[in-house]
Image: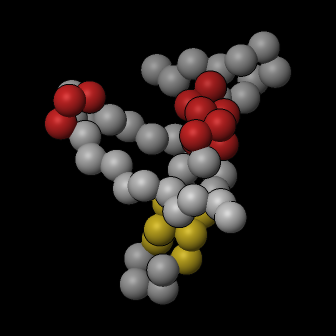
Amino acid sequence: MLSRDQNGQLTCAKDVKRLGVTLEIGASSRKASSGFCTLWTSPSNQRQFVSKPRQP
C-alpha cells in the first residue's frame, strides 16, 4: 500500500519531485516530471544513476 500525507497526496509522488526524477515514455521520448512514483527493484548497492550536468 502506498502511503499518503495529511493532504491525501502520495508520499512517493512528492519524492519524485524532490529528487528531480523524470520518466521517459515510449518511442516518442516524452518526459514526465510528475504524476508517477518510483519503485526500486534492486538493492541500493546495485542501482545505477545518471549524473546531472553541472550548472554554469
Query: Can residue 9 be seen here?
Result: yes
Identify the image's colour scheme: rainbow, by chain, secondary structure or one colour: secondary structure
Q: Quadrant of residue 31?
A: bottom right
* Quarter of the figure that contains the C terminus: bottom right
- Residue found farthest to the bottom: 28
Q: Identify which residue, 39 or 45, lies in the foreground.
A: 45
Above or below 31: residue 37? above
Residue 10: x %, y % from top left: 64, 29
Above or below 21: residue 16? above
Q: Identify which residue, 2 or 22, lies in the foreground.
A: 22
Residue 9: x %, y % from top left: 72, 29
Residue 15: x %, y % from top left: 59, 33
Q: Residue at x 55, y 77 (%)?
A: 30
Q: Residue at x 46, y 20 (%)?
A: 1
How many numbered marks appear? 0
Query: Can residue 13 be seen here?
Result: no
- Residue found farthest to the right: 7
Image position of 2 (left or right of 48): right
Image position of 50 (left or right of 6): left
Q: Residue at x 51, y 24 (%)?
A: 2
- Residue found farthest to the front: 56
Q: Quadrant of residue 32?
A: bottom right
Image position of 25 (left or right of 45): right
Above or below 34: residue 12? above
Residue 13: x %, y % from top left: 62, 37
Q: Residue at x 32, y 35 (%)?
A: 40
